[in-house]
Amino acid sequence: MGVRDGIATMIRALLFCLASWFAFHAYGETVSDPFEKFNRQSHHLNETFDEHLVRPVAGSYRRLLPVPVKRSLDRFYGNLEDAGDAVNSLLQGKADAFVTGVLRVAINSTLGLGGFLDPASRLGLENHDEDFAQTLAKWGVPRGPYLVIPFLGPSSLRDVFARAINTRVDPVRYLRPVDQRNVVYATRFIHVRANLLVAEEAVFGDRYLFFRDAYLQRRRYLELDGEVAEDLFSDEFDDL
């Protein structure tokens, strides 16, 4: 092992230790994972599917897509998410965040040419990452056991229910004709997966436990509006 490989290993080990420490303090000493056997099987299925199909496509997409185009698509998909952020801010009683979300969608959809530009951020309108799972958490609905859904990935009992509601406030759902809607769904999925490729460099050891702890820590961070330890995964796990 060369010096560079040794340093890389040490960095990965440090990242893993820090992630575990933050996850421990973010959601307590215990993790509800009574379905671990089933979850590991689903995790293995998802890993196999990703390795042989999704990851190669995402890798090619990342290599071929020019950086300026990628950034424009980041903003475009982010603008679509802002609609759901605004709705859930309202449901959580966050009036300021709701108004900010509505203004972001209005400004970026018009002056921002459909969201490919982000003039709203330049005007100081901050993005608020909200979804229905966070809304349920706000009103006291417990997370429930951790789940890994085949072909969809990490979740929880509460988040499974929230996924169905989240799709209702996704503007892509109402795009017609259906074949064009499905193209947007597919390209967005690959775009999100391509953005996660770099983060995989920090993953090692028991991949199931790593992804479980990272997912739960990230969800807890969002539920508390960032009022926990520093979020290590703010960039890598924004689209989970």
Image (spheres, rainbow, N blue to C red):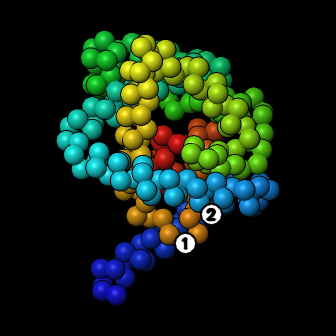
Image: 66 above or below 41 = above
The amino acid type found where label 2 is placed reads: Leu
Residue at 68%, 37% in the rendered image: 160
- Percent position of residue 19, x then y: 55, 62
> In the depicted view, which residue is nearer to us: 108 or 180?
180
Image: 103 above or below 4 = above
On-image quarter of the N terminus: bottom left
Q: Residues within 10 Å of mark 2 (few under 14, many from 20)?
A: some
Residue 151 falls left or right of residue 137? left
- Percent position of residue 150, x then y: 62, 47
User: In what element is the residue under mark 1?
Assistant: loop
- Res. 209 mark: 2
- Counting the numbered discs, the total is 2
Please say whether residue 89 is visible from this viewpoint.
Answer: no
Q: Which residue is mark 1?
A: 205
Residue at 64%, 46% in the rendered image: 149
> In the depicted view, which residue is nearer to us: 139 or 195?
195
Residue at 78%, 33% in the rendered image: 140
How far is mark 2 from mark 1, CA to CA? Answer: 8 Å
Q: Quadrant of residue 205?
A: bottom right
Q: Are marks 2 and 1 in contact (CB under 8 Å)?
A: yes
